[in-house]
Amino acid sequence: MIQYFAIALMLVGVYGLLTQKNVIKLIVSLNIFEVGLNVFIISVGYVSGGIAPILTSQNNTSALLYVDPLPQALVLTSIVIGVGVTALALAFARRLHNQYGTYNLDEMEGE
Amino acid sequence: MSLMDILELVLGIAMVVLGVVAVNAKKKITSVILLSALSMLAVVAFVIMRAPDVAITEAVIGSGLVTGLFVFTLFTKKNEGEDA
Amino acid sequence: MKQAVSIVLVLLLGAFIFTALYFADSSPLQFKPYGDADLSGRVSQGYVDKNVTADAASEEPAAVVYGETKNAETGSANIVTSVVVNYRSFDTLGEVTVLFVAALGVGLLLSGKRRRQEAAFQPSFILKHGVRIVLGIMVIFGVYLFTHGHLTPGGGFSGGSIIAAAVLLLYVSDNAFKAKVKAFKIAEGVAGSLYVVAGLLGLALGGYFLYNFLPTGVVGDLLSAGIVPIVYILIGLKVGSEISGVIAGFATEEEAL
Amino acid sequence: MLMDILSNPVLLIAVPLLFAFLAVFLKKIDKVLLGAAAVLNIAGAALIAVLYEGTKIIELGGFKPPFGISLVLDDYSLIGIVLLNVIFGLILLLSGKHVQKYAMVLLVALAALNGVILTGDLFNLFVFLEIAAIAAYIFTAMDKGFKHSFNYLVVGTLGSGLFLFGIILLYNVFGSLNMFDIQEKLSQANPADSGALALPLVMMFTGLSVEAKLMPFGGWVKGVLKKANTLVGALIVSAYALAVLLALGRVISTVFFMSGAVRIAFTAVAAGTLVFAEASAFSRKNLREVLLFSSVAQSGLVALLFLYGLTVPAVLVLAGNVVSKLVLFTVAGKFAHDLGTDDIGDLKGVFIKFPLVGVGFTASAMSLIGLPLFFGFVAKINALVGLFDAGNVWLPIIILVMAVVEGAYFVRILTTLWNTGDEGELSSKDKLKTFKLNGSAVVGAVSVAVAVVIVALGVLPILNIKQFFSVDFMTFIGQLLGGM
């Protein structure tokens, strides 16, 4: 179920990237796309009835039914990459704002 | 439909609606706060899908730090006066 | 006009994705829908059973039992951690590098003589004093998360980010606060270098880069899993100092020219 | 034992990375570290080439594939890393003064590009591509063109997101991220089922197209490169182009399982890129713009060859192209920086003043067009023969027509740059005096050296006419490299 909405969320992000002209809004759209993608990746690893992939004193053997741990590891990576890119994009946004006095890409004149 | 299915449905719809509103919001700060809320819902989705590690990380980074960075970019003395 | 075109484009893309995923004829290569994943056909089963290095020919390996199994190939009770820091540690090295280079970029873009930038709002009494109370708890929780990353949910990324969030709160609550960016830089460089050095040690001692050259102990013990907790602590320090550095970069602004 | 460790390709990634982290607190000597890493990497690549004994899988962390991440050292990646590290060294040699504060970023980029070429794991490829891309966003901003860099960042991030989406769809089907594991599983699959993989393949191809500069996804390249200095321009058109296109080729040759319609769509993108970019290059008056569109066109050509399984010709074309582009773009950037213009009309007769630079530039350009006696000819003839053998008629015709277009604008550029004044007029020496180039000796020496290599590799195969038309050219180069 969640999977459908994850894809929809990615599409919303793409829609934002296509329509928005504001630097901050573009970065927000990029983040929405990434959230959708991350939820989708986790949903690919979900097993109905599975438990979280951590051995504890209750779930103490590897013979139980676990959800797929690999997509979770990938999403950890993906989230951290996302924050790196967002930080860099915001640094660009601030430089653009200092240079042109606006966040709107259309109002930025010259090279 | 079990209770879980209904929860997932509501969660999914809320996420998409938040996404659409965040993209189309007039004020930039509204977008940012809605993005933070969206991340929080994603955390719930991660918990439902049995991914506690990811949920913790997303809660701290996605809805905490990233929002902080956005706010620092938007709310500084220099940008005052413009509709944030 | 442009909006309409965009909506149509996005809807077409969505229709393409949904038909390809959920409405195509069934074939062995078809997408496996939500919840139907089968671990036995995936590499992940090896991660859960911790028998990746075993020969396929040998008999069915015994299940890993919490608190009993000794010297498994990776002693981490948290399977996600074993994937992140052991099986796919090279990705993680790449990932901290992403943060490293992004932090460098922020520093280069927002460089110049720095002065604390004043926020457009004044911190309230509650914020100011509340932060002081929460701060210690946050740092301790962050450290707890990355030292126990191989046992419980959490780990280097979330632990490091919580410490960075503490720095963020300091900046928000106090308009005059200025962190020692240099200290972040040094912590970042040391942690990063040690991570690579740990990998090179593995290469020298075990013949493989990032080889887990320490005994892995009993699954579930705090001192288990070989280099996993050590590497996760390094990652925590590195992520924490990198994101703190980024925040410091954003909170300060070059001197008005 | 020690030799085993020293010739481990992972060092090509680990050493620059270690130096980058060390440079954080050794800030004073960061440029020394950069130079040292570049030299060490060239030495390492040479050592790997000398000790090379056929395909080798390097397991990381001691976990066998497909479980752990593995690097792959075969003919393909060997050529890649040797070429990449030499090119990177040359770029630093030629444009070292532009490094400024960017030494650490360049170290990370060097590590990431080596990783992109060597890795055999899809997700690992994504991570390295992302590192390389972020480094590129940063140093394309060196020239204060923040708007274009921001555009590049948005498009690049969306592209890598789509690439990741494609990877995860493949993982869902095959349960593995290792390219060769997936390839093996695909070899047992029924070709009739290939339609089910259309979506992941389209997503991965789209994602990679952004970095590989294929149109329409590579539109960022114009804004970024138009004003790029020698360092940034040469990096993007040669080092990045080499690594990313090799990765594209690796992905296509291992995990792409195409049905007719999907192949036609991809071919259309690649061929469209070729035609559009050559036409754009023809209409430009600005040296760097001509070169950037020519570079885009070459990406299209190389992608086209990869799509038709002609790996060896594709690698040859790519290798010839990136080496030529390195010289051409460095010279163009140098003109723009030192003379203040790279408009072809303003640079009349500039090569008479700097004949060494001129010779190198001319040889590189001729190799790029594919004239006989130059390396580019060997590459292009191999490509055309391969396409004909595959029963294809239209693609060779398109490639030939485009080669003529390319020839036309390069001949126009060369005649302008070698002649002073308008046709019929005597060359006026006074005008030339105004040109002043800093460090033209280094640029000249390097470009002449490259020219000699290009000509040697273009002439040598003719001595053995069989090798000239054969796909065995790779082994031939291997022998040359191995015999060093």
Image: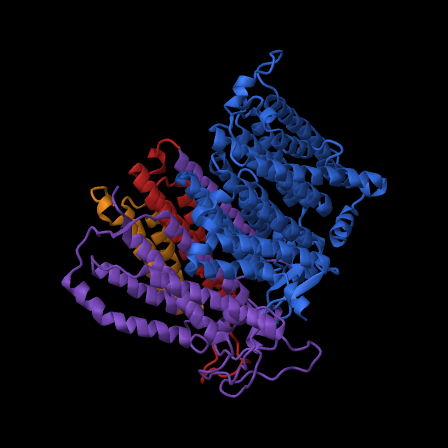
**Of residues D247 and C96, which is closer to you in this image?**
C96
Residue D286 appears anywhere in the view: yes
- The structure residue drawn at horizontal position 30% and vertical position 39%, both measured from the top left corner, is A102
The quarter in which the N terminus of chain D is drawn is: bottom right
Chain rendered orange? B
Q: Where is residue A76 in the image (x, y as percent from the top left)?
A: 45, 64
Residue at the far left in the pictured view: C125
Q: Where is residue D168 in the image (x, y as percent from the top left)?
A: 54, 58
Instruction: Using the rendered view, name the quadrant where residue B41 is placed.
Output: bottom left
Residue at the far bottom in the pictured view: C68
The color scheme shown is by chain
Chain rendered red? A
Residue B58 appears anywhere in the view: no
Instruction: Using the rendered view, name the quadrant where residue A58 is placed.
Output: bottom left
Instruction: Using the rendered view, name the quadrant where residue C37 is placed.
Output: bottom right
**Of residues C20 and D399, which is closer to you in this image?**
D399
Relative to residue C191, is residue C136 drawn left or right?
left
- The structure residue drawn at horizontal position 55% and vertical position 62%, both measured from the top left corner, is D14
